[in-house]
Amino acid sequence: MLPFQDQLTASPRSVLQDVALQLAAPHGGCLHLAAGRSLLLPDRRAADRAGVLAVLEGVARVACEAVCPGVDCGAFTVAFLQEGEQVALQQLCAEGIVIEALTPVRMRLQCSGSEAPLQLVDPVSDWTLQLLRLRHLPLAERRLQALLALLVQRFGRRCGGSYALPFRLSHGRIAELIGTTRVTTTRMLSRMRQQHQLADGDGGAGLLLAAAWIEAAPLIVT
């Protein structure tokens, strides 16, 4: 079998399933994912064997496969994880779990019964609460502002008059998170660029967001 990194460069769905099953072996393992790559844990059995996903470096998105008979509905986001956070995969959906690297990620899948204890704060429950809060805002513009402020609060850093976010999300992914269409999201982001509230980060790898705009977000994120 090819090394993990070589398998992921090819990245067909069947290869990702093979990698997931190998990582879920009794002794677990570590995996490096390049930014933009995804790992599929295809069913409840693989998730149960893996037990716990721990992020050692980087930022990853965790999503559950949606079940829509006859329709490819993709996966819906349940959390974003960063260095030092972990989640019990068996508590998530049985249909399949997708791990997407937003920055280069190093992670480990630990079997149930591993010596490493589960953390007291469940990041999935926390993210579910925060995403539900912002989805209840009545205007799409305010939901977008709240989402970007939440991501900055968790993953960003201050750079003069802006906040730097080390990754970017696709327009389709933002639309999923704030409950609107991709067209509407693209229009709002274009307006933000025109108003100098949004710009590309250094090297185009992330985003710069105006500090005053972020600090005026409608939700106080805890």
Image (cartoon, helix red, strand yellow):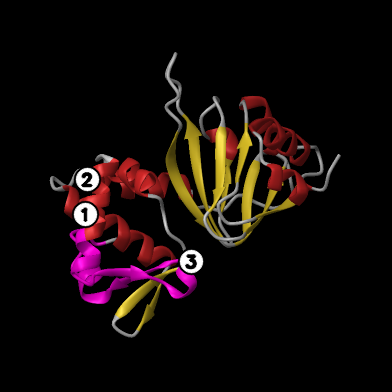
Q: Point out the image quarter for the C terminus.
A: bottom left
**Side of 180 where 60 appears, left or right:** right
Q: Which residue is the extreme one toward the left?
A: 138
Q: Position of residue 74 (x, y in %)?
A: 45, 31
Answer whether labels 1 and 2 touch (C-beta < 8 Å). Answer: yes
Residue at 57% from the left image edge and 62% from the top image edge:
58
Q: Position of residue 213 (x, y in %)?
A: 21, 70
Answer whether labels 2 and 3 touch (C-beta < 8 Å). Answer: no
* Residue type beneath disc 2: Thr
Q: CA distance from mark 1 to mark 3?
A: 20 Å
* Residue type beneath disc 3: Ala
The residue tagged with tag 3: helix, strand or loop? loop
Magenta stretch contains residue 193? yes
Task: Examine the image and state in which quarter residue 206 appears.
Answer: bottom left
Task: Examine the image and state in which quarter residue 73 appears.
Answer: top left
Question: Who comes first in sequence, dot 1 or dot 3?
Answer: 1
Q: Which mark is residue 95?
A: none
Query: Image height check: is 120 above or below 2?
Result: below
Q: Position of residue 109 (x, y in %)?
A: 69, 46
Q: Point out the image quarter for the N terminus.
A: top right
Q: Which residues are magenta?
A: 191-220
The residue tagged with tag 2: helix, strand or loop? helix
**Side of 113 where 40 appears, left or right:** left
Query: Label 1, on which residue?
Result: 188
Q: Which mark is residue 184?
A: 2
Residue at 82% from the left image edge and 48% from the top image edge:
3
Query: Label 3, on which residue?
Result: 205
Q: Which residue is the extreme one toward the right?
A: 1
Q: CA distance from mark 1 to mark 2?
A: 6 Å
Q: Nearer the viewer, residue 210 or 108?
A: 210
